Image (tube, rainbow, N blue to C red):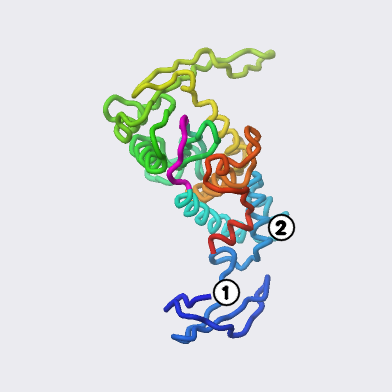
């Protein structure tokens, strides 16, 4: 262990017990500063096994209060673990998901709300109301290339497209829906960011309702319209279906996206941490049924399936 102050060598300097474990102390041989060994998560005294259990439960769609009941931890401790793990996952994803080689990338957004729905939110409350999470998915590996949680407008769409471009390597085909932020003439995010360096198409699904029982109706796709926009896209692969299936996984395994429940996020910061944690777990830990590997393995970003304990160790 090196000194956090001068980076000099240290030696052991006693131990103490906190509520969870015995913590080793060190003293710098150069400047004399004393310090403790790092905990598995910044600012959290919970030990590694218990923190990993909390993270695993959150990644399986268990709510914060339910995690607190099942583990015996305080709700604030569970939230602190979410915040610290989410920050680490965001940094890890930003560093690791680079130079992605993909032939077909799909982009879609998934809706949720923070604290209150739009009808009950005043315009001055910028971090409350409706929010969208943009996701880009490699059709072959199922890798979530990047994500962005914000309002659904032109400025945030442009930022999301710029981030996507910085992570890709080589020409690829991009498919989105027909939201103006993507494909509006001249000022659309895709055209402004990629220009002619991408093959781009849009897909529009027109929905209606089908009567399945007295007074019961189910949504039904009436027609699908696909349109080439830039370059020379292969219209056979111009679809957002795989990204929409990933949206289902987001709702299934991230409690804050579950509809008609009390699990919605109360703060925008915690929503973003939860999304970062889901994306890391989906890419690196969860084996996808399409190919029997994690998306990161198929995309050649890692050589093995990660564990939560490995996340806690690699980010120390």
Tell me if residue 117 comes above or below residue 177 in the rendering: below
Which residue is nearer to you in this view: 252 or 290? Answer: 290
Q: The residue tagged with tag 2: helix, strand or loop?
A: helix
Residue 209 is marked as: none
Q: Residue at x 42, y 28 (%)?
A: 173
Give the CA separation, mark 2 to mark 1.
Answer: 25 Å
Which residue is nearer to you in this view: 206 or 15? Answer: 15
Please give the residue where the numbered disc 2 appears in the rendered image. Answer: 71
Left or right: residue 291 compared with residue 168: right
Q: Residue at x 37, y 21 (%)?
A: 232
* Secondary structure predominantly adopted by residues drawn in magenta: loop
Which residue is nearer to you in this view: 83 or 128? Answer: 83
Q: Residue at x 58, y 48 (%)?
A: 303
Which residue is nearer to you in this view: 17 or 202? Answer: 202
Left or right: residue 34 compared with residue 180: right
Residue 121 drawn in magenta: no
Q: Residue furthest left?
A: 186
Instruction: Give residue 12's position: percent from left, percent from top.
Output: 59, 83
Instruction: Give residue 249's position: percent from left, percent from top.
Output: 60, 36
Total number of numbered labels? 2
Mark 1 surroundings within 10 Å by alpha-carbon count, few (fewer than 14), some (14 through 19), many (20 or more): few
The stretch in magenta equals 97-107
Mark 2 surroundings within 10 Å by alpha-carbon count, few (fewer than 14), some (14 through 19), many (20 or more): some
Tell me if residue 212 comes above or below residue 279 in the rendering: above
Instruction: Give residue 102's position: percent from left, percent from top.
Output: 47, 34
Please give the residue where the numbered disc 1 appears in the rendered image. Answer: 37
């Amino acid at each position: 262990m090196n000194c956090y102050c001068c980076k000099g060598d240290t030696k052991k300097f006693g131990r103490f017990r906190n509520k969870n474990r015995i913590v080793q102390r060190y003293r710098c041989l150069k400047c004399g500063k004393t310090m403790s060994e790092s905990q598995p998560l910044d600012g959290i005294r919970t030990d590694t096994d218990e923190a990993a259990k909390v993270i695993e439960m959150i990644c399986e769609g268990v709510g914060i209060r339910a995690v607190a009941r099942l583990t015996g931890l305080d709700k604030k401790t569970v939230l602190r673990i979410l915040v610290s793990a989410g920050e680490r996952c965001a940094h890890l994803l930003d560093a690791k998901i680079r130079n992605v080689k993909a032939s077909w990338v799909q982009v879609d957004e998934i809706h949720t709300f923070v604290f209150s729905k739009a009808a009950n939110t005043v315009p001055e409350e910028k971090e409350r109301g409706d929010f969208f999470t943009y996701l880009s998915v490699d059709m072959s590996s199922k890798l979530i290339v990047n994500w962005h949680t914000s309002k659904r407008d032109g400025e945030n769409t442009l930022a999301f497209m710029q981030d996507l471009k910085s992570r890709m390597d080589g020409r690829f085909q991009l498919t989105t829906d027909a939201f103006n932020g993507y494909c509006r003439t001249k000022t659309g995010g895709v055209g402004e960011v990629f220009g002619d360096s991408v093959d781009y198409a849009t897909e529009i699904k027109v929905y209606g309702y089908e009567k399945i029982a007295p007074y019961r109706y189910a949504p039904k796709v009436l027609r699908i319209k696909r349109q080439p926009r830039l370059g020379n896209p292969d219209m056979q692969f111009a679809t957002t279906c795989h990204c929409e299936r990933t949206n289902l996984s987001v709702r299934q395994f991230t409690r804050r996206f579950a509809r008609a429940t009390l699990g919605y996020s109360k703060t925008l910061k915690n929503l973003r941490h939860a999304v970062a944690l889901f994306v890391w777990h989906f890419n690196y830990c969860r084996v996808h049924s399409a190919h029997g590997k994690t998306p990161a393995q198929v995309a050649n970003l890692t050589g093995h399936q990660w564990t939560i304990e490995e996340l806690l160790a690699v980010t120390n």
